[in-house]
Structure formats: structure tokens, C-alpha cells
Amino acid sequence: SHFECFWSVYVFLFKTISSLFAGQVQCECPGNTIGIEGGNYTLTNQMHQGSLLVYQCREGYFPFPHRSRQCLHSGKWNPEPDRNLPQRCNLVKCPSPIVLMNGDVYPPAYEYLLGNETTYECYSGYTLKGSSSRICQKNGKWDGRTPTCSEDSGSENICPDPGIPPGARRRGNMFGVDDRVTYSCSEDMILVGSKERTCMENGQWTGREPACYYKHTYDTPEEVAHAFGGAIRESLTTLQSTDDTQEAKKIKILKNGTLNIYIAMDVSGSIEEKYIIDAKKAVKQLMKKISSFTVSPNYDIVFFTSVIHKAVNILHFFDGTVKRDKMADALDKVPIDRGFNEGGVPTPTVARIKNLVYLSNIPGKHDKKREEHLDIYIFGIGAYIYQDDLTPLTVGTEGQHFFKLESLTELNKTFDQMIDESEVMGLCGLHRSYETTDNDAKSMNPWYAEVINGDVKRCFGSLVTTKFILTAAHCFRARDTPEHVKVIIDDEKNSERKVEKFTLHEKFEVGARKNQGVPEFYEYDVALIELKEDVVISNTVRPICIPCTTDTRDALRMNKQSTCKQQEELLLSEDIVQLSFLTKPSDNDHTLKKVLVKNVKAKLRNNREECIKYALKAPNVTTTDVSLIVTDNFLCTGGVDPTIDHIACTGDSGGAVFKDYDYRTIQVGVVSWGTKELCKSGGLVVSEATSRDFHINLFKVLPFLRRILGKDTNEYTPLKFLN
């Protein structure tokens, strides 16, 4: 079908281990000759025909002379074990840096191993550019940048010396307009990147700097996140356009444009089922990451063996038969074919995708190439990768498109880091929705802060802008000054932040209804703390989204004409709404993370009256009119029906009451007070039948938030609130 806008397309091909032979098991391969000194191995089908053996070594080492073996139909291993060259784990080595022209490399060596350091010096009349020293890393690469020695004067070159990467050979030493250089690697290495580069009139080289990879060389998640994630951020950030064109050979998503993403994954029978399950998780994680942005892409997802299993068809997004929030279910339903086969070949799929990418009939734009609207990224995962076969399938005019990762764990890390950087600090509510290996609770809740008021009060707070912390008004005393208060939020500067000033809601007065039988009244229990200095945004320090702002509108994928009331209906529309807030671990449990998440159900609408009546059981309350204690400004949680809620502890006050949407968090309330003190030191304590917590509903205190956070000053950037 025809679309009146450009298609911007990304294709992700996840290629893992595939079997070479089909047929029934004939005989087993011997197991007494396949051991490895200093390491171990895994088998995809025990010692049976077609089984793939993959060697593993500890970090910093690689299997030598082979990374894997295949059990053949004849009952022999391919390649066969060699008694004269036993399998062992060797220390990682890096490609030879003795390729520097017009300079010297120290120390000269036959080979360079993990941890070896080299230094570079240029001859007289030449200036060193790039790194003056480099260290061999555990992934088989040198750190830093490729050094070059450039002539100080008299050069007629238009482009700078493109250098020679370690282990490479270069043909071409002329750097004028249209001059070309070509690269190659030695036989035991593979070239990744541009084999040929051309000097352009603007003084830049086409393509990207190549690199020579050993079979044990891998890209790190940090490297892939920087290269791949940068391209994704560039594409998924919605841009304004004056002429509805896509210039500079970069894929941009216009306001009325469409992004189509194709994902193809090899799930051949020789791949262990756990790896296929992990691969599906990685795809889900990628989709969740992309959903953090304000565009809604269409997906086409296939899993191929000898038969293609279509998980999601891209055309179904256009006819409405597929919902994006149901894609995870579609992935889970794809069968895992355990029959041994040769695996699918991605080449025909790539060809079909290329034919689908076209341009609309826009005058003067017929000379545009289809590939300018298509990027194909290939991720080779594991040891048994046919890199020479996969690299030519990549498509793209900018940046790196083939990545080699050691495991699916590394792929998960890549997707996790892909947008968790300061370049997208304008996006509120970004977080990890799963635990990482280091149990980094801070990156799962990057907006939380601690508010310490002398030795008397300890509260939670939430970062709502780089300058402001939202917390509870009762965390302050009448005599307090900014000098009494400090905020703990671990950014790159320091953890303890000084306070410029704090502002309590003007209508907050604890003793306002003491004469009416309410000893402590917490109406309008909110406050804002202005910090002396902005916090530094990172993957572990980010603002949370608060209601009725344009940022929250975009996070919720609502249209520009949507209202604050519509946000409230979306977030708090049900009779029972799942919410969360944070607590500290209990004092006697030092094994837990820095903060824990408490899950509660807000009782709204028809369930509200039953919930709030327990406020009359709070200590020293003598009134029988619950409306004098709990106004419409409060959310009510706690109790044991319909589920047993967590209950707030002393010290949880001021914390965000929030709701998660994929990778975006929206704060809807502030923890205020409770009817029973069931815990003082934190921990995941559950509610009793009559215990209740009450939280300030942020939708009810918007004038206060707007007046301070929306104020346009020279001191800080204001939030944009909806009318």
C-alpha cells in the first residue's frame, strides 16, 4: 500500500549459533579429546551428530586454537583435536600497532597481550594526532584513538590522514578530493568497517574508520550503545521540518513520518532453548527502550529456521489488528523448532525489505537512493559467527552497522545503555524496569532523593527538575532555614546538596482543625526544595514526570490537544489503581539494596469511601466526620482488600507515589500520613485490615506546582504546564 510520508526503517538481525547439518543422529563423537586447559565447554546436543561445542575461558583469555567444534555425521569433530596443538586458554592479544607511518611505536614486540601499553612518537616535521599511548583491553581492542603523524606544513591534502588501524594495511597515501584509500587485514583477522574511503570536498572521509578483529575480539556494550544508540536517538527524536525532506543522509522521523522496524532472528535447532528465550527477552527490551521515545514505530518480527515463523506483521499495525502493548505476547507464542536444520538465511529477507523501502513522488527528489531511508544493523552474538557472510548484509550510509558481542547478556547491557545517557536528559521518568546484575536500585528509581532536616526529620523526595526536589511540607519545622536542610542525591558532583530555599504550600497548617477533633491536619502537605546547583543528569539521576506538563503528555503518548483532565482520567481512572512508593531497608537487614519498592492499590471512585473511613481510627481523633480529616486532595491506600498492600513507615514521608509505563515513571502523589505506625526503620511491611495511608494527590495541588516550577526565570529552566 502507499503512504504519503517517508518510511524510515531500521532492521535488526540477531544472528547466533546455527547448525551445519540436518538429518537423524547417526553416531556420537568422542568426548575424551575435546577438553580445554584453563577453561570449559558447552554442547548444544550432547555428543550427537550436529551438536556444536563452544569453548569458554575466564575473562581476559580466549580459546586457542579453536573457539568451537562441530560433531559430524561420521562421528568425528570438525576441526579434529590435534595432539600437537592442544586446546587451551590463551591470554587475549590485540592487533599489532606497528603500522604507524612517519613515526615510531614503543616497545616493539612480536605480539601485544592484555594490559600491554604502547607509546607513539612522530618524526621531526610531523605532529602526533590521536592517542599518544594505548593499552590492550580484555576484548582484544586498543583503548584510545588511532594515532597518526601529520606533516606540519607544505601539505596539499584536503582531508586529514585517516590513519592505519592496528593490524591493518592501507593502500593510498594521497588525501585530496576524490582520492581513495583501501584497507585490508591479515589472514587471521577480519576487517570491520569501511574497506574503502573517499576524500570529500568538505575535508571529511566517507564511511567510518575500519578495525581488524581477531575471532576473540568483541565490541563492548558501551561501544555499541554509543554507536548504535546514538543513531537510534538521532532517529527516534521527533523533529520539525520545513520542507518535509530528510537531508544529510540521516534517517529522521518527521512529525508526520513513519518508522518501521524489522527484526529477524536465527533460532535454528542447534541453538539451546535458553538462548532463544533470552533472545526474545532482548527483543522485548529493545522495544521497551524504543517506546521511551515519543514516536510509535511499526514492527515486523520473524524468527527463522528452515521455516519462517512470523511473530508480528507490519501491515497489521496499519489495519489495527495488532496493538503495541500486546507484542510481548506475540513473541512468546512463537514456537521453538527443536529439529536440527541448517537454519534460515537472512539474505532473501533483506532483499525483500529493500524492495519495500521507497520514496513518495516528491518533485525533485527522484534521485534519492532507497538505501538513504534504510539502515540494517546486524548483531553477531557468540563465538560461532560467520562474520564475512553477515557484514555484507548491513546497509547504511553513516556509522557502524555490524556489531560483534560476546553473549546475549552483553546485548541486554547494550540496549539498557542505549538511551540512558545525558543526551536525552530532557525525557522525564526514564528508568530501568528490571533488576540488573549489580542490583542497581538507583538506576531503577533514578529520581529519588533523601531530605535530611538536622537530626530530627528524615524524609524522601523526588527530583522533578535539575533544580527542584518535591517532598512533604511536614518534613520541615517552623524555625527551619535552608542551612538546616540538606538533600542527598548521588550525581557526579557529590551526594550532599546545599539548599537555596524551600517553599511549603501556603495553605498547609497542621493545627488548622485541632478544635474540630483533628489533632494533626495534613491538607496541602507538599513542599518544593530549590537546590543551590543543578544536579548532573545521568542514567542514575533523572527527573520524574509530574502531572499536567508537556513532558508527561509526551511520555504518555497523548496528542498535543490533550488536557490536564485527560491525563488525570488516564492515570487515575479506575476504581482500583496500582501505585508504588519507596522505602529504606530495615535497620537489621543490611543485605538489601539502598531502596525498596512498596506496591499498593489506590482505592478510588466507588471504593474510596470504604478506604478513608479508617482515618477516624487515627490516634487522638475525636471527630466522627471523616471529611474533616481526609479531603478530596488525598489518595487512600492500605488494607487487605482486594490485595494486602504495603504500608508506609516513618521516613517514607515526602516520597513519590508513582505509576510506571514501560520505561517512563509518572508521579501522581506524595506520601503524607498514616493511621498506624507499624514500622519506624523502613522495610517491606504489610498493612493490617484497619491501617491506611494517605497521599497528596498532585492533580489537586497544581496551582502550587505551576507557580514555582513553571515560573520563567533566569535562574532555572521552567517546566511547561498544560493550560
Image: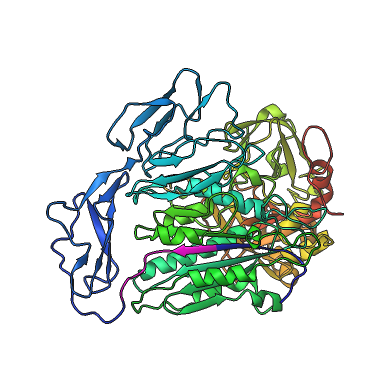
What secondary structure prevails in the magenta region?
loop
Q: Name the spot of residue 322 as percent of width and height, x first.
A: 64, 76
- Left or right of 691? Residue 84 is left
- Residue 383 percent coordinates (x, y): 34, 57
In the rendered view of the protein, which quadrant contains the C terminus? bottom right
Asked whether 681 or 358 is in front, the reply is 358
Q: Is residue 107 left or right of residue 487?
A: left
Q: Which residues are magenta?
A: 12-21
In this view, the residue in front, 424 or 190, is 190
Q: Is residue 91 magenta?
A: no
Kindly give the residue lying farthest to the top in the view shown. 124
Q: Is residue 354 above or below residue 461?
A: below
Q: Is residue 16 magenta?
A: yes
The answer to whether residue 687 shows anywhere in this view is: no
Using the image as rendered, state which of residue 706 and residue 328 is in the foreground.
328
At x 82%, y 55%, the residue is 243
Task: Tell me, yes or no, if residue 488 can be seen here.
Answer: yes
In the rendered image of this protein, does residue 480 appear above or below residue 183? Answer: above
Q: Residue 674 appears at what percent x and percent y? A: 65, 54
Residue 675 percent across, percent down from the top left: 65, 56
User: Number of numbered discs present?
Assistant: 0
Q: Residue at (77%, 59%) from the top-left corner?
A: 255
> Which residue occupies the extreme bottom position in the image?
24
**Quadrant in which the N terminus is drawn:** bottom right
The one of 428 and 520 positioned closer to us in this rendering: 428
